[in-house]
Amino acid sequence: MTDRSTASAESPVALCRPWLVLAAVLVAGLALFVWRVGSTGLVDETPPLFAASARAMARTGDWLTPRVNGLPRYDKPPLVYWLMGLGYALPAQERWNPLGTWAANLPSALSSVGMMLLITATLLRWPQPAAAGALVSPGLRALTAASAALAFALSPLVLLWSRMAVSDALFSALLGAALLLFWWRYAGARAWWPGWLVLGLAVLAKGPVAVVLAALTLLLFGALQRDGRGLLERLRPRAGLVLTAAVALPWYGLELLVEGRPFFDSFFGYHNLQRFSGVVNNHLQPWWFFLPVLVVASLPFSPLLVAGLWRHLRWPPGAGTAPRESLGRFAACWLLAVLLFFTLAATKLPSYWIPATPAAGVLIALAAQDLLAVPPARGGRWWRLATLVLVALLSAGLLLSGRWIPLIVEPELPTLPAEMIASGGVLRAGLCFGLALLAGLVLWWAPRPWGQLWMLAQQLAMGLFVTTSLVPLIGLGDRLRQQPVRRIAAAVMERRAQAEPLAMVGILKPSLHYYTDQVVIYEGVQPSGPANLADRLLREHRRGQRPSPVAAGATLLLVIDQRTAQLPHWAGLAHQPLAADGLYQLWRVQRSALQGWVEDLQRRGLPGPDWQRPRPERY
């Protein structure tokens, strides 16, 4: 062991107590994820569906079945809705949660903060050896623990999804916590049950995929570690799975009992089995899709991730690593399990990679530790140089944004390029990455102990990017994309007559339902849209909406975007303009005029209503 005086000479942070390191990571996590997380509105399309379901739970007291826009929402289990709902159950929402995002986004943000703390605590409790038996001082151990948490948190995927009202960040944190607690037990922790309990919560956050990913990770780790029997003896999987089932299954059983076959077919059939075996929502990607995602999700430290994988997945593996020193191998198996499973899945989305990001953070930090240890690992200089080159490229690309931003074409946001340039947010991001590059270059040749701050200094500079650039750019996107919808929603609330139906056609925004708190009939741009709308008003049943005849003087409010309003099957519909904001217009339409317009379209050969055909993603 290195005594206190020697340790302080070897590293500027050698005297840091574990609680100080954890406190610093907590402050960093709050700055990255919680700061101003409620300052912008809900981002269409998925977050408003989660938020509206959670708010409905808090208002109605029905905490069993998530419901949105008058329909049950079977796509995700209830844990994220419960956590959001607790926020919506608090009083004085109009004061502290006027846009709905504090209550909706906070579970995702706090989940990632919690993951940062658990990664840090793991590496502080069980510091890992460097390659080739190099000396790891107490200060370098503290740096490795903090850098691992920041490597996870600064992943572009984690930064974005941790500020959204969806279940991905919560699921990633719970699955990651369960896996780390499993490794804690293998490394020597006394309690066998915490990991299984948290795994049950992960099943309540996303579904049975949590058990599949955990099992695949443990199988790979047991095989590579050549200690499958020891792993099983420590984890006690039979008793553990009983505990996991006791946590997760009661809700599934009650939901099946109450909702029956529709829940089974939608949740298990469509949202789990069919997403794995078939392509849904046109998310068809090549088999190698997650390889570039792996690189992008760890920028600019992707070379260190490759170095970490190379060290801990080398084949043949040789003798098993001591349990207390096997975290790198475990993290590599964890990342490989996510890669293999979702590569085999037919439906592929970038967010599916988020459960691998905690493992990537650990591998990146351990690879950096190898480079900073004495003596340095062979070939480490090239991994370090590749990282600096990526930082330089990112900085240059962002500083030259004036050349490529004008090439962005987004019909929904026509003024976005000019607004981005005027805001200066992208240039500030380039300066932050430039500062990271400067820190990396200066500390490359810095004498010990300051040279050990090489990676942490770069990470802190990149953290400035979040507070000075990313958050303001999110605010800009909200002002351009979401604020017009909120204003149209306010116009609806002001102009809507009692029990007057509300519809939205063309660009579909679930946030209109959230901000009006009314059932919205959504129809896309298809030619059958007018016929569907008229027929749904006559026949469709859902909570908050009853069928109604075409009576004299009956009207509906219609929100339509400019491009859809010019389509032949909508352009001739008689209406009264009430309001306009951005791309959106608010019309009042006589039900009799709509019915007559549909009959005219059908005489011209346009299709009749098809809204009753099964649509799993309907809301």
Image (cartoon, grey):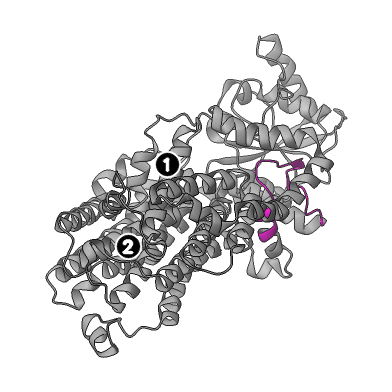
Judge whether 8 appears above or below 244 on screen.
below
Instruction: Quadrant for the C terminus, please.
Output: top right
* Left or right: 102 as drawn, with respect to 307: right
Q: Is residue 154 visible?
A: no
> What type is the residue that disc 1 sits on?
Leu
Judge whether 225 appears above or below 115 on screen.
above
Q: Does the segment drawn in magenta span residue 306?
A: no
The residue tagged 1 is: 339
Disc 2, disc 1: CB below 8 Å? no
> What type is the residue that disc 2 sits on?
Ala
Q: Position of residue 304 (x, y in %)?
A: 27, 55
Q: 339 or 246, which is in the foreground?
A: 246
Judge whether 409 appears above or below 156 on screen.
above
Sort mark 1 into few (<14), some (14-19) or many (20+) by Cα contacts within 10 Å.
many
* Left or right: 462 as drawn, with respect to 149: left
The residue tagged 2 is: 365
Mark 2 lies on a secondary structure that is: helix
Mark 1 lies on a secondary structure that is: helix
The magenta-colored residue range is 61-83
